């Protein structure tokens, strides 16, 4: 007997996740509730199911995926320093150098998906500004090691080179593109 396929592997669900991702990428600091779209599947897995295929690669740096996910994702497993998509725990310190692209092709950089505790509540407060942000907006986060923000500043210091961050919790996603300016207004890990 064939088991019921999980919603995140269905094209119509992936299209909705993609639209949500485009919304948060174009409006840094905005959150989208992916659990409503994916029947409560992990937002990180839903994003990867939507974005990956046999032509791209992935590093699951902290082993957050199940072995059964890999055949469905179809992505090539690579070392973190060669990965265009990297899945990590946000509460861990950074221990690698991601792809930052080249001046002739800055799009060949890494997108880092950080799994955090919560992206709408928390004791760490950030002020965001830049393209796609209407003035300054404040966001609250819990479960993000500040090292990610410090390293991000170094990684984007030679714009247009850099990385884009996607923060996901149990239900939501938020993007911090390389063009977003981040000011830490208070921090508690």
Image (tube, rainbow, N blue to C red):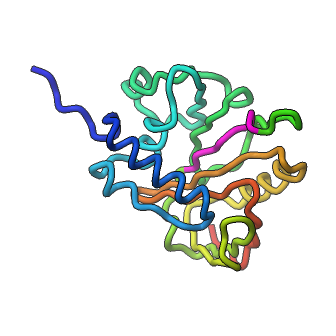
Left or right: 29 as drawn, with respect to 181: left
Q: Nearer the viewer, residue 23 or 184?
A: 23
Main secondary structure of the magenta stretch: strand
Screen quadrant of the N terminus: top left
Q: Nearer the viewer, residue 82 or 8?
A: 8
Residue name at image x 80 percent, y 39 percent: 106
Tell me where residue 12 appears, x and y as whole percent: 32, 41
Tell me where residue 52 appears, x and y as whole percent: 51, 31
Left or right: 58 as drawn, with respect to 103: left
Residue name at image x 76 percent, y 72 percent: 183
Tell me where residue 46 appears, x and y as whole percent: 41, 43
Residue name at image x 60 percent, y 25 percent: 57
Residue name at image x 59 percent, y 43 percent: 88
**Total number of numbered labels?**
0
Q: Is residue 75 above or below residue 32?
A: above
Locate residue 128: give its quadrant.
bottom right
Left or right: 43 as drawn, with respect to 5: right
Q: Which residues are magenta?
A: 107-114
Q: Nearer the viewer, residue 142 or 24?
A: 24
Magenta run includes residue 67? no
Locate residue 55: give its quadrant.
top right
Q: Is residue 99 above or below residue 79?
A: below
Please identify the residue farthest to the left as the structure is shown: 1
Magenta run includes residue 111? yes
Q: Is residue 111 above or below residue 21?
A: above
Locate residue 81: give its quadrant.
top right
Screen quadrant of the C terminus: bottom right
């Amino acid at each position: 007997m064939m088991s019921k396929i999980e919603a995140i592997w269905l094209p119509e669900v992936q299209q909705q996740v993609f639209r949500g991702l485009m919304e948060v990428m174009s409006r840094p600091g905005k959150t989208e509730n992916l659990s409503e779209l994916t029947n409560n599947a992990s937002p990180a897995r839903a994003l990867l199911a939507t974005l990956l295929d046999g032509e791209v690669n992935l590093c699951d740096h902290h082993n957050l995926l199940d072995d059964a996910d890999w055949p469905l994702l179809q992505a090539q497993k690579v070392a973190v320093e060669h990965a265009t998509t990297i899945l990590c725990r946000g509460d861990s310190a950074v221990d690698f150098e991601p792809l930052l692209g080249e001046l002739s092709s800055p799009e060949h950089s890494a997108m880092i998906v950080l799994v955090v505790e919560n992206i709408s509540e928390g004791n760490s407060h950030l002020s965001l500004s830049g393209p796609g942000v209407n003035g300054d907006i404040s966001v609250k986060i819990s479960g993000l090691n500040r090292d990610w923000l410090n390293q991000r500043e170094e990684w984007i210091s030679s714009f247009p080179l850099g990385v884009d961050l996607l923060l996901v919790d149990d239900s939501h996603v938020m993007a911090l593109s390389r063009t977003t300016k981040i000011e830490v207004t208070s921090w508690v890990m």
